[in-house]
Amino acid sequence: MSKQIPAVSIIIPMYNVEKYIGECLDSILNQTFTDYEVIVVDDCSTDKSCEVVESYLPKFNRGGVERLYLFRSKVNSGGRPGIPRNTGIRFSRGEYIMFIDSDDVITSTALEELYDTAKDFNADALHCGWWYATEDGTVTTDKNLLKETSWEPAEKPSKSYQVSSKLSDRVSEFIADKFWGGTVSNFVKRSLIATNGIKFPPYSVSEDFVFKFQLICLAENLVRSANIFYV
């Protein structure tokens, strides 16, 4: 199998989600953009989550190219999701990194939209503050059946734009909750993370906000994305 360098690394931490991880992986298989790798980091699941992921290996490894990898942690993180995410970052090879939670899905054009936006702006990081929610909990990526939602006290931008380069402006917006800190709001250059040694702290809560604050402070070219892709 060839291990060519992908454009995007998708990192998925996993723990006891045998009922959901298949739907998550299916949404990635349905992408219009296919230059990616998927890194699933299992946090010592006690159910059949790993077996489900292993059953998807042949589906992802098409045309002689490996695209799905499963890493099994030897010790459970104790409810600290940043630890398996850091493992995923360490093994990633893509130009850009994004994160998906193992019980969520993405729209079929997600990777294409995010990668194109990032390249158009030569962005070090995209901030994506809006996402979709289902009305009744049914798994779907049909935008007609989804509700746009956000935790940010701001209107959804009509188009993507470059955020002010002034650190004081960025920090002020972060304090005012205008940068939602959720992990899945990030689409970031791996080189930015590697060069600055950015990691998730070993916390059980708010580890994603610490990670996001580092991105906001260190990204030379930060872009607020108008793309909505996460469900």
Image: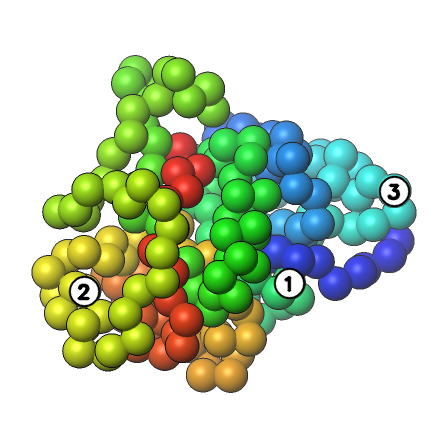
Q: Quadrant of residue 151?
A: top left
Lower position in the chain sequence, tag 3 or tag 2: 3
Q: Which mark is residue 23?
A: none
Residue type at mark 1: give it.
Gly
Q: Please give the name of the residue rendered at 78% of the width and 51% of the height, measured from the top-left corner.
A: 66
Task: Give x and y (percent) for residue 24.
Answer: 53, 34
Lower position in the chain sequence, tag 1 or tag 2: 1
Report whether 45 appears left or right of 207. right
How dense is the environment of label 3, judged by Cα within 10 Å: few (below 14), some, or many (20 and up)? few
Q: What residue would you read off at disc 2?
A: 174
Q: Please give the name of the residue rendered at 37% of the width and 16% of the height, measured from the top-left corner.
A: 145
Quadrant in which the C terminus is drawn: top left
Residue type at mark 3: give it.
Gly
Q: What residue would you read off at disc 1?
A: 94
Q: Quadrant of residue 29?
A: top right
Q: Is residue 107 visible?
A: yes
Task: Give x and y (percent) for residue 57.
Answer: 74, 41
Task: Give x and y (percent) for residue 228.
Answer: 39, 38
Image: 130 above or below 99: above
Mark 1–mark 2 distance (CA, rounded to whole Å): 27 Å
Q: What residue would you read off at disc 3?
A: 63
Mark 3–mark 1 distance (CA, rounded to whole Å): 19 Å
